[in-house]
Image: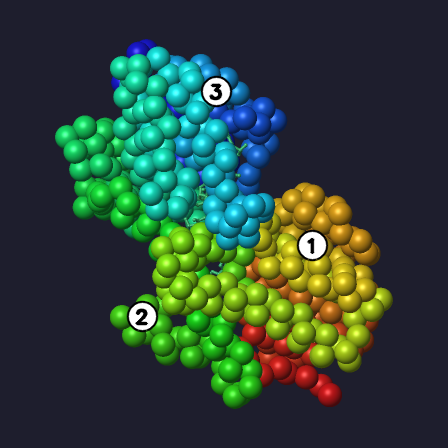
Amino acid sequence: MTMKKNILCIGAGYVGGPTMAMIAHKCPKYKITVVDINPQRIAEWNSDTLPIYEPGLDELVLATRGKNLFFSADIAAGIRDNDIIFVSVNTPTKTFGAGAGMAADLQFWEATARQILQYSQSSKIVIEKSTLPVKTALTMEQILNSAHNGIFFDVLSNPEFMAEGTAIQDLENPDRILIGSRETERGLTARQVLVDIYTHWIPPEKIVTSNIWSSELSKLVANAFLAQRISSINAISALCEKAEANIGEVARAVGMDSRIGAKFLNASVGFGGSCFKKDILNLVYLCRSYGLDEVADYWEGVVKINEYQQNRFTMTMLKAMFNTLAAKKICLLGFAFKANTGDTRESPALFIARRLLEEKAEVVISDPKALQNATIDLKDVRGSIRYVEDPYEATAGCHAIAVMTEWDLYRNLDFKRIYRTMSQPAFIFDGRNILDHRRLFDIGFNVYPIGKPPLTHF
Ligand code: NAD
Ligand code: UGA
């Protein structure tokens, strides 16, 4: 069968894999190829055990792989054979040189641009799917159109707004699809090609088009706003603990104002994930580089409150447990940065585990999907760490439990049974406020929620 369109995606990660599987599923007449510089990752996408855990992803890949979805390590052929190229390579925070710890590290991005230029034999549309600093498209255009060989590249911005754990739902039914382009005749024609792809399943009113810089910037701003809500509620959680208010009640009352809305107001041990912190720091760096220090300071506060919240959580544990954690066994229930993913990048659990080990606690880590990543994350950290998937086995003999991830599984544990197997006095620190605190207290636990006064037997 001849395919109506051939589409390439460079970068087979958390974004590239699921987004392309969804396009393949919704556009059966298009051939989609996903390439990556990491051949191991490609082999995993072609195997029975996909490299990432995401509810619904296995089914989607199984239905499309080998039909119109292909994973390949041949980047050169991919570029040569496809005229529509999504780029979803990683754009982490720079760890060296100017802007270290703040700016986006664009080396993978630029390497991709150079690869595209090197292997292209015809004009192409290149789509930024990765999250990038505003004005990156300009650099991309400059590199791509530097050869003056009659081949022309149109660059579009099409940021991804899916969240891990709900990626498939989000991709199937997004709040919006954003497409930024140059507002020239060429730019608008390229934009229409992308609109036509999404029109296969997205209602037209949800496909928003804009100028390319607005599109790039909107992605950073959306993440900054989301993270800002979490830092706002987390800041207030500290006040609630002092003032005997209940953060759940405050969040409900505040969120019922339709101008504010109820989502993203769950107080927690802090936000994690590969993007919030990096994207806000990227925004902060951009503002500073434009001389907008007040704006930069404002957004940097979101990251500072997140660090404060994680640190506060550890200090609460330390103080509650008689100011020493040395040789105490502490079970972290959950290690993923949120439920329904195995991803541990920037997970608050990572920070807490490190801090507890510094205090010489013995840490037991439990998680239904993230133990493999946890082992890799902590491989260079010294101290006593055990990885135990079964939560009953993991908590047995422990002095304390700290809930790090809001897995449903933890809501329904038999805490009476757990209490009996723990060292006394037993403590629970609920970093996600998902447990029934009054019931735990009645069982005998000393309970420390976020943003509510503790319930203790002392
Ligand atoms: P990831 O690390 O999971 O995947 C990136 C992939 O790109 C890796 O497999 C890497 O090997 C590959 N790669 C790097 N350089 C390459 C090159 N030159 N050629 C071919 N492949 C190359 O990252 P991710 O989580 O998928 O994120 C990708 C981008 O999407 C980032 O900019 C991120 O900010 C953005 N984003 C991520 C999410 C998310 O939920 N993870 C959501 C929205 C946007
Ligand atoms: C986030 C955004 O929600 C996506 O729109 C965006 O595409 C993505 O970043 C990205 O650019 O990578 P993600 O990080 O996957 O998605 O997950 P979220 O649901 O946003 O959760 C982020 C963190 O905030 C998690 O640690 C979560 O537990 C925490 N969180 C979330 C809270 O502490 N409280 C809340 O009310 C909501």
- Distance, label 3 to label 1, CA atoms, is 38 Å
User: Which residue is labeled 3 in the image?
Assistant: 75
Q: Counting residues from the N terminus, which is met first, the one under dot 3 or under dot 2?
A: 3
Q: How many marks?
A: 3
x, y percent for residue 131:
41, 44
* Residue 120 or residue 395, whichever sits in front: 120
Q: Secondary structure at mark 3?
A: helix
User: Which residue is labeled 2 in the image?
Assistant: 260
Neighbour tally class for label 2: few under 14, some 14-19, many 20 plus, Cα within 10 Å: few
Which quarter shows the N terminus?
Answer: top left
Of badges 1 and 2, nearer the viewer stands: 2
Residue at 45% across, 22% down? 115
Report whether residue 23 is seen. no
Q: Amino acid at mark 3?
A: Ile
x, y percent for residue 433:
55, 70
In the rendered image, which quarter is residue 270 located in? bottom right
Of badges 3 and 2, nearer the viewer stands: 3
Q: Amino acid at mark 2?
A: Ile
Image vertical order of residue 111 relative to residue 216, above or below: above
* Residue 7 or residue 205, whichever sits in front: 7
Residue 232's tag is none
Residue at 83% across, 69% down? 326
In the rendered image, which quarter is residue 110 located in? top left
- Distance, label 1 to label 2, CA atoms, is 35 Å
Toward the right, the furthest residue is: 327
Q: Amino acid at mark 1?
A: Ser
